[in-house]
Image: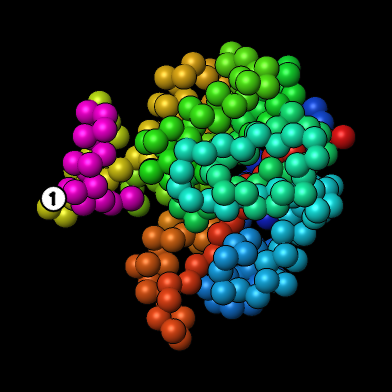
Amino acid sequence: MNKESKTFKYSSLKLAEQANLVHGFFTRKGGVSKDLHFQSLNCNLASSDSKKNVITNREIISNSLGFPYNKLITVTQTHSNHVITMKDGDEHIKHPAADALVTNLPGILLGIKTADCVPILFFDPKEKIIAAAHAGWKGAVSGIIDNTIAAMQNLGANIADIICVIGPCIQQVSYEVDEKFYNNFISVNPTSREFFIDSKQADHYMFDLPAYCMARLKNIGIQHIDNLGIDTYSNPEFFSYRRATHEKSFNKEGKMEYGTQLSVVGMCS
């Protein structure tokens, strides 16, 4: 794992060594947003942050990787298992409803927003196929990871060649859930018990979301996995929905306010 302070991002050594590929798991630093909730590299267009600020922040990210802003593609994330494959002529579609993007096109950046959920970047270096997925617990359980890999395979990717990187997200030490969450989760897959440990609080558990995502990847047959192991909740460099909730980060109207960071991957033309 590399941290590049100049552009305020973390990177994976597995991806950094690939020719003609750029990527980054950006922090909340280095942007223009001034509001306390959004300082400073907020990338969430759906937030109450100034749209101008958010666009400028996204420009900072895309330009730092050598791409113009109009080549940065993101999705309207809904915690689904829906994947969109970007094809020639689709670059103008800026915010389709989905939770993962896949393409074999050079010259565009695929971006995923997170604030505790798991950002996963994918690359097949032989077939030159990239993907970016947003895996919250709902999407992970319903198959967003499996569907992303399947979409890559539809473009010709080989499971044996795909590199996957699990970026900064909430770690088990910070992710306490109640008994209802636990029961609902294991009702889908009883073997998921291994991703929970008892919390100090009665009838509560600590859930390991990144380990669950890694297990899904391994079950599919992915062999090349890098897990950055960075906790967005405890690390103030990152936006965290759960931290904002615990800190009662409300605006004057009583609405919860928090920013999102961006994780991106792209192939150079």
In the image, 46: left or right of 69?
Answer: left
The foreground one among 61 and 128 is 128
Circle 1 SS class: loop
Q: Position of residue 178 (x, y in %)?
A: 21, 51
Q: Quadrant of the C terminus?
A: top right
Give the vertical position of 197 relative to 48 (above or below): above
Residue lying furthest left in this view? 202
Is residue 98 visible in the rendered image? The answer is: yes
Q: Is residue 72 above or below residue 34?
A: above
Which percent across, then down, holds residue 144? 48, 35
Label the magenta part by its dominant secondary structure: helix
Q: Indicate the amino acid at tag 1.
A: Asp
Which residue lies at the image location 59% right of the left edge and 56% below the top edge? 261
Query: Magenta part of the protein: which range?
Result: 175-190
Q: Residue at x 69, y 43 (%)?
A: 110
Residue sitting nearer the eye, 152 or 212? 152
Q: Where is residue 8, by image quadrant?
A: bottom right
Q: Position of residue 34 (x, y in %)?
A: 64, 77
Crowding around mark 1 (Cα neighbors within 10 Å: few <14, some 14 to 19, many 20+) is few
Q: Residue at x 37, y 67 (%)?
A: 245
Q: Is residue 98 left or right of residue 14?
A: left
Q: Which residue is mark 1?
A: 203
